[in-house]
Amino acid sequence: MELYLDTSDVAAVKKLARIFPLAGVTTNPSIVAAGKTPLDELLPALHDALGGKGRLFAQVMATTAEGMVEDARKLRAIINDLVVKVPVTAEGLAAIKMLKAEGIPTLGTAVYGAAQGMLSALAGAEYVAPYVNRVDAQGGDGIQTVIELQQLTRRSQRCWPRALKPRVRRWTACWQAASPSRCRWTWRSSLLPLRR
């Protein structure tokens, strides 16, 4: 099992990396925009906050496959071992295939169902990020989506669920649902069970 933070708060990463065994940091366009630090400054700062260890994830902004590939190359020019987050749309699936051919690791993001996640895995995504909170908010069962996705991808891919609500019922379900060796859990730094 691995723990990632979903943040652009460099100070929080420094503080929490000292306490928790963090595997890395994920970002997305809204997190980056809220932090108001350009990616070319933010990503190296996050890398340093992790002590030069751990994996960083950043998302493309383009909406065409070719544009996503170009965005991915630019992101990898900033941090050469970065994992590129690509929304699992038709264009995103094409981009994942192209990036796989270039040897650039990807995370299929904005996944709302197991079949969508499986398509990203088949296209070549090394990670798949089902939106557990959003599935729940839309009346679905985010944890069940994770379980179904794990079953579909059991032999070839890793399943990486996004941030989960910090309710006891859901925390318990996380551990019951997870195949610990296969899942990477992402939490907002403010949701970690830590007394201030």
Image: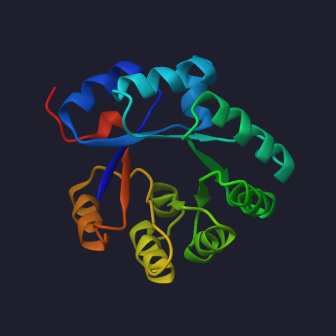
Residue 147: which quarter of the image?
bottom left
> Left or right of 5: which side holds 102?
right
Which residue is nearer to you in this view: 178 or 102?
Answer: 102
Q: Residue at x 77, y 58 (%)?
A: 98
Residue 9 makes an appearance in the image: no
Q: Residue furthest left?
A: 195
| Residue 180: image location, x then y, percent | 28, 67
Looking at the image, residue 15 lies above or below residue 167: above
Toward which corner of the image does residue 110 lie, by quadrant? bottom right
Image position of 125 (left or right of 13): right
Across and down, in percent, residue 6 comes to 43, 39
Q: Position of residue 50 (x, y in %)?
A: 35, 29
Residue occupying the point 37% across, 23% down: 49
Residue 11 visible in the picture: yes
The quarter holding residue 10 reads top left
Whole-percent x and y of residue 141?
44, 70
